[in-house]
Image (cartoon, rainbow, N blue to C red):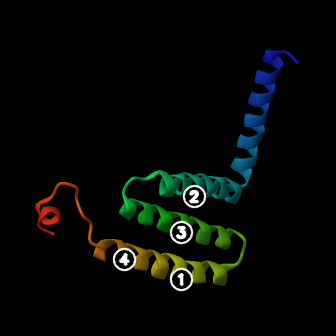
Amino acid sequence: MAIGDRIQDFFDWCGNAFDTFATNLDAFAFVVLMIIAIWAAILVVTSKEVMHSAFYLALVFTCVAATYYFLNAELVGVIQMMVYVGAITILFSFSVMLTRRTIKGSDEEEEE
């Protein structure tokens, strides 16, 4: 198969995907939501600030809850929002904020 045929197949696939998303907006919203969730999940792991990771984790939990709404499981989506986004993420944020952080080379470290 020549490279030109592969490029043509790719553009045909893109056209078919666009037609599918134009006629089915739920599928388009689902794909956008999953792209945001995957992006936020990668940022949870790669972020250098712990607090930013907690907020990215809340975004992942919110995307998962919205996915439950697409699956017509509204009760599970509401429970996901209340338990994970509301409770677990806030607990994690407070524990990070209340943990003492030492800075290397500070005066407090030398006194101890």
Observer-nearest of 16 and 75: 75
Label 2, secondary structure: give it.
helix
Q: Earlier in the sequence, mark 2 or mark 3?
A: 2
Nearer to us: label 4 or label 3: 4
Q: How far apart in space, not on screen, are marks 1 and 3 (Cα)?
A: 11 Å
Residue at position x 72%, y 71% from top? Answer: 71
Q: How far apart in space, not on screen, are marks 1 and 4 (Cα)?
A: 17 Å
Q: Earlier in the sequence, mark 2 or mark 1?
A: 2
Label 4, secondary structure: give it.
helix
Q: Are marks 2 and 4 in contact (CB under 8 Å)?
A: no
Disc 2 marks which residue? 37
Disc 4 marks which residue? 95
Residue 12: x %, y % from top left: 79, 31
Nearer to us: label 1 or label 4: 4
Nearer to us: label 1 or label 3: 1
Disc 3 marks which residue? 62
Q: Earlier in the sequence, mark 4 or mark 3?
A: 3
Q: How far apart in space, not on screen, are marks 2 and 4 (Cα)?
A: 24 Å
Q: How far apart in space, not on screen, are marks 4 and 3 (Cα)?
A: 20 Å
Label 1, secondary structure: give it.
helix
Observer-nearest of 104 and 92: 104
Q: How far apart in space, not on screen, are marks 2 and 1 (Cα)?
A: 18 Å
Answer with left or right where residue 42 lies relative to residue 34: left
Observer-nearest of 66 and 58: 58
Q: Which mark is residue 83?
A: 1
Q: Are marks 2 and 1 in contact (CB under 8 Å)?
A: no
Answer with left or right where residue 44 lies relative to residue 111: right
